[in-house]
């Protein structure tokens, strides 16, 4: 029998020590072997790198970045380490996820049975709330470039067969390393948000399929350390950048109208309710327009 394929799980940490430790402990309890875990501390100002090293010890490989490279850049440090180790699969995970012991093995089996699949996601559960009304946060997703939107499918899936998805969320992106070698790593200039969609669309363009495995499940706590103005800036900036990269001029124009409408509604709410002005969204939209006119290429 050939040896089981090596899986490397990649966790990016930025000011999330407690979440990261819980996530790593759940990964270390995985029933699947061979499986290694690499934690990338993205220059947390709170000294997380030293604390993670002291807490997790030699059970994981720790990479301490000298600067904050953004989510994609931090994940790329871990993915390069995985490639150097000869990993066949690499699993990029948000640090506020908890993994079931059988999940890694289920994802490997599905990948081995679907050699044309470039990336998989487990079915991602979450506390019931606005983002997960039925307790499911991601059961696949759809891409609407003309609206600069991605939509999570929120209905619970059953069965053990892979269900096709329009993209894979970066919350739990189980990657075939061969597909990453074919299409490239995360696009680091995005820095934050939309890097998962960009990589998904690159894979689809190259002929790889994407899917969700319903029987493999993890839990996502849906929280992080990014302020809303920062989130808005990168969301609006990167939305137009990614749409123009993969869509036509007409698609980009349509997306711009939808995004501009969203910024206008935020301004109206801010003025009527005497809330802070949506400066992050406004700046992001303007920079996104400038980048769109330049039509960025890789």
Image: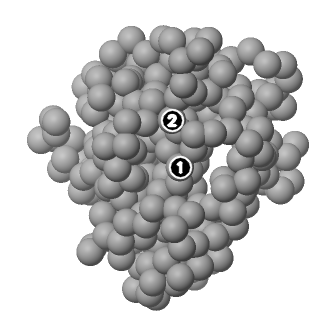
Using the image as rendered, state which of residue 120 and residue 55 is in the foreground: 55
Number of residues whose C-alpha sits closer than 10 Å to that of mark 1, classed few (under 14), some (14–19) or many (20 or more): some
Q: Position of residue 197 (x, y in %)?
A: 44, 36
Q: Position of residue 278 (x, y in %)?
A: 45, 70
Vertical order, 135 against 64 (above or below): above
Residue 255 appears left or right of 294: right
Q: Residue at left 45%, top 62%?
A: 61
For the view shown, which residue lies furthest in the bottom direction?
A: 46
Using the image as rendered, state which of residue 162 and residue 64 is in the foreground: 64
Q: Split into 4 quadrants, where in the image is the N terminus?
A: top right
Check if mark 1's residue and mark 2's residue have beta carbons within 8 Å.
yes
For the view shown, which residue lies furthest in the left direction?
A: 294
Q: Which residue is mark 1?
A: 36
Callout 1: SS? strand
Q: Which residue is mark 2?
A: 6
- What distance separates the C-alpha of mark 1 from that of mark 2? 8 Å
Q: Position of residue 201 (x, y in %)?
A: 40, 26
Vertical order, 45 against 222 (above or below): below
Q: Residue at left 37%, top 36%?
A: 86
Q: Quadrant of residue 41?
A: bottom left
Whether residue 131 is visible to the viewer of this picture, yes or no, is: no
Whether residue 189 is visible to the viewer of this picture, yes or no, is: yes
Q: Residue at left 45%, top 30%?
A: 88
Mark earlier in primary sequence (1, 2):
2
Q: Quadrant of residue 142?
A: top right
Callout 2: SS? loop
> How many discs appear?
2
For the view shown, which residue lies furthest in the front direction?
A: 1
């Amino acid at each position: 029998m050939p040896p089981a394929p090596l899986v490397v799980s990649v966790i990016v940490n930025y000011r999330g020590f407690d979440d990261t430790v819980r996530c790593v402990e759940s990964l270390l309890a995985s029933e699947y072997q061979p499986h290694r875990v690499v934690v990338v501390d993205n220059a947390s100002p709170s000294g997380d790198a030293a604390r993670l090293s002291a807490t997790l010890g030699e059970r994981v490989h720790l990479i301490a970045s000298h600067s904050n490279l953004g989510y994609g850049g931090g994940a790329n440090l871990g993915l390069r380490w995985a490639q150097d180790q000869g990993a066949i699969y690499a699993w990029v995970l948000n640090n506020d996820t908890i993994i079931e012991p059988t999940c890694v093995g289920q994802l490997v089996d599905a990948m081995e049975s679907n050699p044309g699949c470039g990336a998989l996601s487990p079915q991602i559960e979450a506390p019931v709330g606005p983002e997960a009304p039925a307790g499911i946060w991601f059961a696949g997703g759809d891409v609407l470039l003309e609206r600069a939107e991605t939509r999570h499918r929120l209905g619970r899936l059953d069965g053990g067969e892979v269900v096709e998805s329009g993209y894979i969320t970066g919350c739990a992106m189980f990657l075939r390393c061969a597909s990453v070698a074919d299409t490239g790593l995360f696009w680091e200039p995005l820095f934050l948000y939309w890097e998962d969609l960009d990589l998904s669309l690159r894979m689809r363009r190259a002929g790889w399929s994407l899917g969700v495995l319903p029987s493999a499940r993890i839990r996502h706590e849906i929280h992080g350390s990014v302020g809303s103005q920062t989130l808005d800036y990168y969301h609006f900036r990167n939305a137009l950048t990614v749409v123009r990269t993969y869509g036509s001029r007409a698609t980009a124009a349509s997306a711009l109208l939808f995004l501009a409408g969203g910024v206008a509604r935020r301004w109206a709410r801010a003025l009527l309710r005497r809330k802070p002005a949506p400066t992050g969204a406004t700046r992001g939209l303007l920079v996104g327009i400038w980048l769109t006119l330049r039509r960025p290429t890789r």
